[in-house]
Every structure is written in structure tokens, then in C-alpha cells.
Image (cartoon, helix red, strand yellow):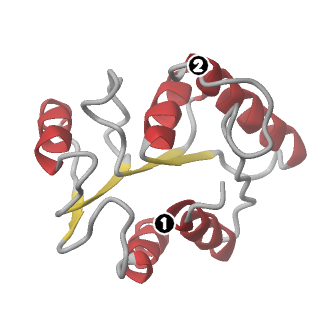
Amino acid sequence: MDNKVVTTLAKAFVELGFAALRFNFRGVGESGGSYDKGNGETLDAIAAANFMRGKFPGLPLVGAGFSFGGYVQARAAEVLQPQHLVLVAPAVGRFSMPPVPADTLLVHGELDEVIELDAVLRWARPQHLPVVVLVGAGHFFHGHLTQLRQIVLQHFRG
């Protein structure tokens, strides 16, 4: 929840006029429960999104996730059908990623040391999914958070 990539995404969405919700997955920080290999975490993400839909019924639903959170959001999107999906360095190759909508914003660091760019490209290619690659960026986007923010803002502002 307090990861700088997640915080950067939340701030970008607030700047765009969205309501943003960040939460820890079960067993992380002070959250109850324990790691469930993405199954319970996906249910938690769906519950969080439905909570936001109830609080802000006039706003479109945007699912966004970083790394493991990208995997969870891709799975949750199959149920939630959000208007937009943003995946940053999703955990391709570590989990069985489902296909995502063609208009998904997918951002990955060229030098990602956790999730290989080649794995992301292999997953995206059959879906004809564009991938925005930040040159010189690693998994945590050190020194590239401003670029990441600008990519998200530009994607939604057109």
C-alpha cells in the first residue's frame, strides 16, 4: 500500500479526478489473514472495488496494480469489467496471467530485475497488447516515477 509505485499511481488518479483506494493485501502490514496465492487477494480486490463503486457511483472504475497487484487486478477485471485497467510491471511468469482488455495500459521497465521484459512481451504479443517500456527503469522504477506518472496522465487525458 505504501510502495512508491502504488503511491505514484494513486496520486496520478487523484490528479485526474478519480477517487483512489490503496490497500494492503491480506497478511501485509496490519492486514489480517495470510497470503493466498492470489485467490483471496483477488476476492479482496473485488470487494474493495465494489466498496468504491458504492461510495462513488458516478465515477468510472479503474483497476490498477503493480507487480503482484497487477496479477490480482487482471484477475479481478474478469469479474469487475472496469472501464480501464492499468498494469505496471505485472507478475507475468510468476503467475498465470489472464488475458486483459486491448485498451489496458501496460507499463514495464526495460531493466526490470524481478519480472523479465521478455516474459511480458510474450504474454502481451498474442493479445496484440501495446507495452510502454520505460528505458533504463527497473522493477521499482527508481528515478523514473515522474515518467510513470506522466504516462498514466497522458493515457487518460489523451
- At horizontal 62% and vertical 27% (from top left) the residue drawn is 41
Q: Which residue is mark 1?
A: 156
- At horizontal 24% and vertical 31% (from top left) the residue drawn is 93
- At horizontal 54% and vertical 68% (from top left) the residue drawn is 4
Q: Residues within 10 Å of mark 1 (few under 14, many from 20)?
A: few
Q: Position of residue 149 (x, y in %)?
A: 46, 75
Q: Position of residue 70 (x, y in %)?
A: 45, 41
Q: Amino acid at mark 1?
A: Phe
Q: Position of residue 156 (x, y in %)?
A: 48, 66
Q: Which residue is mark 2?
A: 36
Residue situated in front as seen by the camera: 154 or 74 = 74
Residue situated in front as seen by the camera: 26 or 82 = 26
Residue situated in front as seen by the camera: 126 or 42 = 42
Q: Is residue 20 left or right of residue 136?
A: right
Q: Amino acid at mark 2?
A: Asp
Q: Residues within 10 Å of mark 2 (few under 14, many from 20)?
A: few
Q: Nearer the viewer, mark 1 or mark 2?
A: 2
Q: Secondary structure at mark 1?
A: helix
Quadrant location of the C terminus in the rendered image:
bottom left
Q: Position of residue 52 (x, y in %)?
A: 80, 43
> Is 88 drawn above or below residue 12 in the view shown?
above
Q: Secondary structure at mark 2?
A: loop
Picture quarter containing residue 10?
A: bottom right
Q: Earlier in the sequence, mark 1 or mark 2?
A: 2
Report how many numbered discs are placed on residues in the image. Answer: 2
